Image (cartoon, coloured by chain):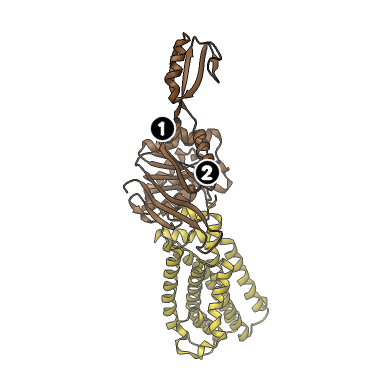
Chain colours: A yellow, B brown
Amino acid sequence: MRAIALMAYNFLRQRRWPVLLLFLWILLTAAVAGDFGRSRPAEGDVVFHAQQQSIYICIFSAFLAADALHTERKSRRILLLLAKAVSRAEYLLAVIAASAAASVAYAIVSALCSIWLGARSILPSGRIWELLPLVIAGTIISASVAVFLSTFLNPYFATASTLAIFCAPILFHAQRHAGWVWLPGFPFLVQFLRFSFKSDWAPNWMSVVATLIESCAFWLLASALFALRDVAVPLE
Amino acid sequence: MSGVLDYTHVTKDYGSPWSRRRVRALDNFSLSLERGEIFGFLGPNGAGKTTAIHLALGFMRPSSGGGQMLGKPFGDAPTRARVGFLAENVALYHLTANKLLRFYGSLSRMRPERLRLRCREVLEQVELEAEADRNVARLSRGMQQRIGLAQALISDPELLVLDEPTSALDPAARAAMRELLLECNRAGKTIFISSHLLSEVELICHRVAVLSKGRLMKLGRTEDLLVSRDRCEIVARGVPPGSFAQSQLSDGRVQFTVATPSQRETLEKIWALGGEVLSVNPMRRTLEDVFLELTNNKEAGA
């Protein structure tokens, strides 16, 4: 576990500038939604801000995870990592953990901004706290799917394919089917889009459990596939 | 298979089976490293040296054949804690030397107390203790290479696998690296070096293998390869200059080489001319001569 934590921390440290820039982006969007504190935001604006940020966080997580493997291979730093007592499964878990950790930090900052916006319009902050676990689960599954796809696709295709996998069911109206909860990412997207401060919205905790199981499955699949791949490009 | 590193009929092809651009990097390659030796792995660019090293460390899988490293199949993660690896064109994370070594040491499952001690030791070994708190990105290429070697040594490995370890070093640093490798070898480490610098290999390696286009061309003790069985060198005095083809005269001594089968005939001729034979030795070649002979023959054959 220590090796995984160290590698994850190292990935995060390398990507600290884009993560910090995103924090600024969240603060800016919250400030715009709140009209820079001059007026009370409408309930619709707060809902839109929370929905938008929730989806952005999942995209960000997918992008971070999909890019990690490619960057490490291209820089050849992966060679010294995998030359140590680190299995490929541990390495991928570190990539997923790092991407999810950055996104969780993003989600928390975003939640605090939404709560600030909501408080200005006297909206219940409890709803935002209920949304937060869904967003965190969404980041984990998007990182897992992106890592799985990046083991055999380039980072752009991996990110695009992750988003396509998440969005395709919505385009094909899969919400009509009973088994929709098992589709990766889709349950969150539906819940994010339906999010509201009214009592007709309630988080589906089953989808969080399903997602954690699916994330493990994608990680195992990615590990099995990555074990078959050559990580080194010959210099000669 | 009982060596420290064993390759058994390993073939590695790059490219998909149906691709026209499929390249065979290693062809039925077999090799066994003995414990405690320094082994030199030579070959021109594209010979398959790096591929062979990457296969052993599990970065890639062989198309056929296989092998073992420290008694475990290639790619076994726990076994790599007992192996130190330095890649060609080493790429390091931008951390201070000390933090970087701790990071790599932790990945080799070292305990924090032991790791702290080893960091100091290896930085002293590579003569970079003064740079312990500097970011490696700000160090020279040669210093980075030495930090690369330090991370390979951090877990006190049984086997060191070094891919072009001296390529970025100046002559003084190269000599220091040579001394360090000899010291590691005296401490019982087996060392596997791939290098283009034949003079370096000649100076420290017990055995060498020459690889060309994925095939093992020559394998043997360095001493044996450097001694020619085909020709011998004769030094004599008291013979008229010009008595023997391509002879060199210095201080009244005539020195020339002859084919080994005509050695007896030549010695009799010296005595017949009233000369005295001072020495007869098998001709010594440099590793470069052997290397060029093998690789040129292969190219001519191809």
Q: Residue at point 63% right, 85% down?
A: A42
User: Which image quadrant is residue A116 in?
Assistant: bottom right
| Left or right: residue B296 compared with residue B119 | right
Secondary structure under tag 1 reads: helix
- Residue A143: x, y in percent? 50, 70
Q: Residues within 10 Å of mark 1 (few under 14, many from 20)?
A: few
**Three-letter amino acid code of the residue under disc 1:** Asp
Chain label for disc 1: B
Disc nearer the start of the sequence (2/1):
1
**Three-letter amino acid code of the residue under disc 2:** Gly
Task: Name above or below for residue B189 compared with residue A20.
Answer: above
How many labels were placed on the picture? 2
Q: Residue at point 43% right, 70% down?
A: A221
- Residue B180: x, y in percent? 44, 36
Q: CA distance from mark 2 to mark 1?
A: 24 Å
Task: Give whichever of A203, B227 is nearer the camera.
Answer: B227
Q: Residues within 10 Å of mark 2 (few under 14, many from 20)?
A: few
Identify the image quadrant of the N terminus of chain A: bottom left
| Left or right: residue B165 compared with residue A24 | left
Residue denoted by label 1: B224
Residue denoted by label 2: B301
Chain label for disc 2: B
Q: Residue at point 46% right, 84% down?
A: A181
Task: Name above or below for residue A1 compared with residue B56.
Answer: below
Asked if labels 2 and 1 share a chain, the reply is: yes
- Residue A226: x, y in percent? 46, 64
The reply to whether residue A5 is visible in this rendering is yes
The reply to whether residue B74 is visible in this rendering is no
